[in-house]
Amino acid sequence: MALLSVSNLEVEFKTAEGVVKAVNGMTFDVHEGETLAIVGESGAGKSQLVLSFMGLLAENGRVAGTALFHGNDLLQMKPKELNKIRGRHIAMIFQDPMTSLNPFLTIEKQMMEVVMHHQGLSRDEARSHAVEMLRAVRIPDPEERIKQYPHEYSGGMRQRVMIAIGLLCEPELLIADEPSTALDVTIQAQISELVSELRKETKMSLVLITHDLSAVAEIADRIIVMYAGEAIETGTVDEIFYSPQHPYTRGLIASVPRLDRVSDDELQAIPGNPPNLLALPEGCSFRDRCSEATEQCYQRPPLWRAGSGRTSRCFQGIEGGEIVAEPTGEGEE
Amino acid sequence: MSKPVLRVQDLAVTFTSFTGGWLQRHERQLRAVDGISFELHAGETLGIVGESGSGKSTLARGILGLIKPGRGRVMWNGEELNCLNEEELRQKRKELQIVFQDPVASLNPRMTAGDIISEPLWTFYPNMERLQVEERTRGMMKVVGLLPNQINRYPHEFSGGQCQRIGIARSLVLNPKLLICDEPVSALDVSIQAQIINLLKDLQKKLGLALIFIAHDLSVVRHISDRVMVMYMGQAMEVSNKTNLYRRPLHPYTNALMKSVAVPDPKLAAAMRKESWLTGDMPSPYQRPKGCIFHDRCPFKVKRCEADVPALRRMEDGDWVACHRAEELDLSIEVPASG
């Protein structure tokens, strides 16, 4: 059984301009020990997707569907029940390491609080556990550094602290929302190396959210590509990178500037802008930015599955696949 | 060869801060930019690359006189900018413009796109006809790939990439000769980054701009630069022609930066990861290492690197490097066959 099983998840926001459907019927599983990457541009709904089952949606947000964690629906839980799971069984790392740490508290305090609350450790036990965790994320001289405040740490070190806090209770699932986007490339490389090493040591599952496919090329097992609130392609990491089905996935791969190519011709951008969720184009939501769009794309493409289990939401390649979900017709108004 | 339009000589910017209480006040000096020199020709692009805290943005501000340099000279078309008074410098700013990193934060949320783009015109040409200003604004919007009928929209109605186009239009509306782009794409989605880089490249060709493009990622700089300067802790480690730099970097730090770039190819990424070697963070700017400032992170260091400061020196093919071992090290980047 999957550790986390999300089905038909929908997230809506009531805004002054109308109801915005940020996530439109997402279904996926996260298995034990697996790294799943969710990739898409800003506004694709990837962050709202995970915030919804963590119970962290904004006030005007509504969520529907199910998100079963060990068979229990996270969406039906009261805050009190959720609090027993969040931080303990499911931990989350946010994008900006500066704003997610409390600037008024020492790192020691912020780390000890987590284990004392969730595991009922004594102060001394909590402190030594925290020091150990800092050492695990390669903070030099952790006994001394733990007494410092966040501003005394560099950006990369702060993100390591965030990872350490996330790992303190040895969660079964770690969700990282753009963990290295705000960091330098050199530090990004260090963080992804750290994450993949830590994953080898534990059986933890990992959900990585990013806009940059190249950032997950090495760490991910499976990838979901999101566009306008929907999964438009899913597959194993090799399937997505070496034989992408959806034109959008191909565009995302082609737009990454490469050092390993001899030519330095013009970069291939995806034309246009991320879609306005209030005014999606009729038919396929990617149609107006797609260079391969045809007449057929004025109808909504169904989600189809190929033999290996990979899925795509595009008329291309549909002949070889089995249709799993007919177009819902939603998002057409 | 033509004369360079911009000549920066031994530019240094130092910040002073105070620690301790007022009874035991200690003064600390932070050398953010420490003796940078380069020349830039019309129509040429210099890429500046380095980690956060390497002094790239401070250098940009120092060139434009937005921060007073502590030492050194900035010559613009033979005229020394630091000698000008405030009004003269203000007039010169018509020719020297900058695009900032955060496309949304650098636009006033209460001004429309049209107001933002035309503001420099009103500032410098207060007597310009309203119709003429609007015509120029609409024209500029077209140039940067915005629809002229979006002129009355506010920044929040645009996406990040479009906001950056507004920022670029605002900098270009005065017909500058030099454009400095300070991390113009690092806040954008990868898919949109390419649009902005291609736009800047086109505009430069069309307008004959001298361009300084700042980024922390060597792969981004590659597609737009003629020469690349690699900065570390306020100093230039290497200034090389683009083709040479990407084939055979001279400085170990350049090599390290190239090996940390992520590639969208799982097998290649795994192979590159094995080769990447840069560990740790940049040292505190208050405790600069003696000798070569990079020596404590450098796997190629020898005794000499801990004691002697390597000068930035010219190599045979005209590239510049600050490393004692530049001749003996071969840091060529092998391009492994992909997938």
Image: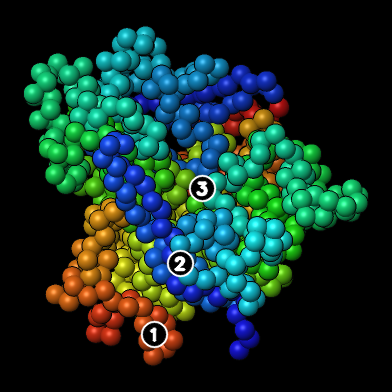
| Chain letter, disc 2 residue | B
- Mark 3 vs mark 1: same chain? yes
Task: Spot the residue most to the front.
Answer: B23
Question: Is mark 2 in CB contact (under 8 Å) with mark 3?
Answer: no
Q: Is residue B107 above or below residue B282?
A: above
**Residue B132 relative to residue B146: left or right:** right
N-term mark: 3 or 1? 3
- Residue A306 image point, x, y percent: 44, 44
Q: State yes or no: discs 3 and 1 in contact (Cβ < 8 Å).
A: no
Disc 2 on helix, strand or loop? Answer: strand
Query: In the image shown, does A316 or A233 lie closer to the viewer?
Result: A233
Q: Is residue A125 visible?
A: yes
> Dot 2, crowdedness within 10 Å: few (<14), some or many (≥20)?
some
Q: Do circles 2 and 3 both sit on a common chain?
A: yes
Query: Residue B314 got which mark?
Result: 1
Q: Mark 2: which amino acid?
A: Arg
Sequence-wise, the earlier of marks 1 and 2 is: 2
Task: Judge by depth and name the residue closer to the eye, B107 or B145.
Answer: B107
Q: Quadrant of the C terminus of chain A?
A: top right
List the residue tagged with mark 3: B187
Looking at the picture, which amino acid does disc 1 mark?
Arg
**C-alpha span from label 3 to label 1:** 35 Å
Question: Is residue A186 shown left or right of residue A274?
Answer: left
What is the x, y in percent for residue B241?
A: 47, 79
Circle nearer the viewer, 2 or 3: 2
Decide: few, some or many residues near mark 3? Use Cα within 10 Å; few <14, some 14-19, many ≥20. some
Quarter of image, res B23 = top left
Residue picked out by circle 2: B71
Q: Position of residue B299 (x, y in %)?
A: 19, 68
Residue B267 appears in the figure: no
- Image position, residue A293 (x, y; %): 66, 50
Is the residue at mark 1 from the same chain as the one at mark 2?
yes
